[in-house]
Image (cartoon, rainbow, N blue to C red):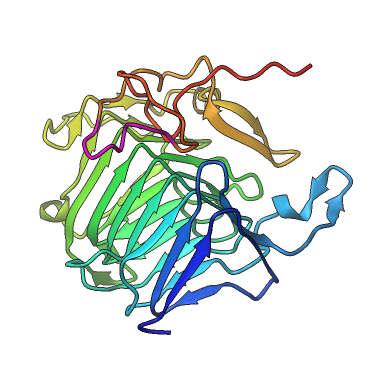
Amino acid sequence: NEGATLTIGAGTTLYFSNKAGIDVHGQLKIAGTADKIVTLRGDRLDHIFDYLPYDRVSGQWQGIHFNTSSYDNEIEFADIHSTYNGIVCDSSSIDRSTLSLRRSTIHNCQGYGLLATNCKIDVSNSQITNTLKDCAAFFGGNITLSHCTLAQFYPFDGNRGAALRFGNSTDGKQYTLQQFNVFNTLITGYAEDVIMGAFSDEAAQNFKFDHSILRTIKPKEIDAAKYVDVLWEEAADTVQSGEKHFRKIDGDKQAYDFHLSEKSKARDIGVALPNGISTTDHDGFARDEKPDVGCYEYRPEKKKD
């Protein structure tokens, strides 16, 4: 309810039935830690096939919904997966933070991963991956993405959405995009172009991509104020170019590991960001003086016995 605060402590696992979710009118704080993450998942513990547990199937529960009256929500070290929509943020005042999402995962959604309309949102060191609709969609507001991995390898539908959609226009309505800043972020997927703009006119295009990898069509004329030290995965690239960034992409078994592979071009091409954002990665591991792009700092994969 409005005025109330729900705090979910470190190490908690919450199981949701198909029609259940978290509907927030007040404030939500998810306070996980690197060694005690908070897990939000469906309640099915059985398998749909021998090789495929229901926990890997999207649409198992309804996700988190922040209503217009909800502000100053904080989610850290959380694993939110196999939902319909992962997180939805309704239109609110951009003078106050709606959500700070840090070192968290939103994965395998039958709708959107993160959908925000006219909100102030800050996302850092977080993974948003594999959704039927867009992995992340922002319309209007004040948005900052730092050290994020947005990867669209949703396997069930060739009409899957973008890895990132942003702009000032949706459903015939327009919202002022005060700022949209993206730093040290890896945006890739199956399609040749996984980044979509939704703007009413050129004057509304208030955005900046800085030290990021973008799988989209490279503009013929690059605006240096909007694109700073960007590495382009152009349309001519093969699907495997996007896959090579990661340890495992197995659509048949719904098994994914979005930690960086040794071959990833995301290694060592980021820039150190202020306020400690580049100090530690998604898992809480220290980054070096040349931080990697995306939410994970590369670490050699442990050999299996």
> At 39% from the left edge and 53% from the top edge, which residue is drawn?
101
In the image, residue 34 above or below residue 203? above
Look at the picture and state if 3 lies above or below 127: below
Left or right, residue 158 beside residue 162: right
Q: Could you say where residue 128 lies in the image, as x and y percent from the top left?
A: 48, 47
Choose top left, top right, bottom left or bottom right for residue 111: bottom right
What segment carries the magenta color?
A: 273-281
In the rendered image, residue 2, in percent from the top left (x then y), is placed at 37, 84
Q: Quadrant of the N terminus?
A: bottom left
Please tell me which residue is depicted at 17% across the width and 64% down the height of the picture. 176
The residue shown at (66%, 49%) is 156
Residue 33 in magenta?
Answer: no
Query: Which residue occupies 51% across, 56% down?
Result: 133
Foreground residue among 256 and 124 = 124
Q: Main secondary structure of the magenta part?
A: loop
Residue 17 drawn at (x, y percent): 70, 71
Q: Nearer the viewer, residue 158 or 67?
A: 67
Q: Is residue 274 magenta?
A: yes
Q: Quadrant location of the C terminus?
A: top right
> Where residue 244 appears, x then y in whole percent?
54, 22
